[in-house]
Image (cartoon, rainbow, N blue to C red):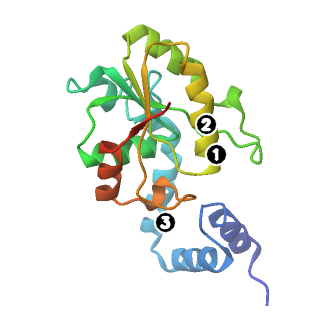
Amino acid sequence: MSYPKHLRKLIAVFKRLPGVGTRTAERHAFQLLHWSPQQRNELAQAISAIEENILHCRECGCLSEKEGCHFCSDQRQSAECICVVASPRDACTIEETGTYRGMYHVLEGLLSPVEGIDVSQLRIDPLLDRIKKWGVKEVILALDATLEGDATALFLKEQLSLFSVKISRIAFGLPMGSAFDFIDGNTLARAFQGRNLLT
């Protein structure tokens, strides 16, 4: 017997989430059937409020609930160093290690011809503008140890060669092909402290 149309639609929506296949999507959908109307309403309200209540900082690209963000307003940050990450989540992961006190810049992705992501879709020009504006002395590339991360780091290195800045990339104590999602805090902290200059 096939599932009702609306249930099939719900399963299809869950399958859009990363790492969620058909079986997991079905479990999530059936779990919602057991929730109370109030619980389902809370979920619906939380999702519908995303667009209005979660903003991207115009300066660094990190997430905020208001104009300006925690990272840009943090007085502990040094303007001499900027850490380049692919997503706001990466900045939060690094911040939790307590090992970095500079500025952040979110690219909003990595170069990926397969996924159709090219230079024009990344926040590279704003990065170069911020380096000029703040007189940044070091740029740390905290990008995934993947082909996409390597390609993006190489492109940024070429772009940054026009500036008199030190360029480094964090070291990874993990095999090639690993992503930020699977790095624990201690490993990330050691990798950050052991970053290498790109020559």
Report, in whole angstroms, how far the alpha carbon at label 1 lies from the one at label 2: 6 Å
Depth order, front residue of 51/177: 177
Q: Do the residues bearing badges 1 and 2 touch, measured as CB atoms within 8 Å?
A: yes
In the rendered image, the residue lying farthest to the bottom is 1
Residue type at the position of mark 2? Thr
Crowdedness of circle 2 by 10 Å Cα count: few (<14), some, many (20+)? many
Q: Position of residue 141 (x, y in %)?
A: 46, 35
Please report the residue visible at 58 percent of the width from the left and 58 percent of the height from the top.
177
Please report the residue visible at 59 percent of the width from the left and 43 percent of the height from the top.
150
Q: Position of residue 163 (x, y in %)?
A: 49, 13
56 sits to left or right of 193: right
Please report the residue visible at 60 percent of the width from the left and 61 percent of the height from the top.
17
Crowdedness of circle 1 by 10 Å Cα count: few (<14), some, many (20+)? some
Residue type at the position of mark 3? Arg
Quarter residue 29 falls in: bottom right
Crowdedness of circle 3 by 10 Å Cα count: few (<14), some, many (20+)? some
Q: Is residue 181 above or below residue 170?
A: below
Mark 1, residue position? 148
Q: Position of residue 124 (x, y in %)?
A: 58, 24
- Disc on the earlier residue, 3 or 2: 3
Q: Do the residues bearing badges 3 and 2 touch, measured as CB atoms within 8 Å?
A: no
Report, in whole angstroms, how far the alpha carbon at label 3 lies from the one at label 2: 41 Å
Residue type at the position of mark 1? Glu
Depth order, front residue of 143/116: 143
Helix, strand or loop at label 2? It is helix
Tell us which disc is closer to us: 3 or 2.
Answer: 2
Please report the residue visible at 70 percent of the width from the left and 43 percent of the height from the top.
112
Q: Position of residue 117 (x, y in %)?
A: 71, 38
Mark 2, residue position? 152
Is residue 123 shown to the viewer in this render?
Answer: no
* Residue 40, disc: 3
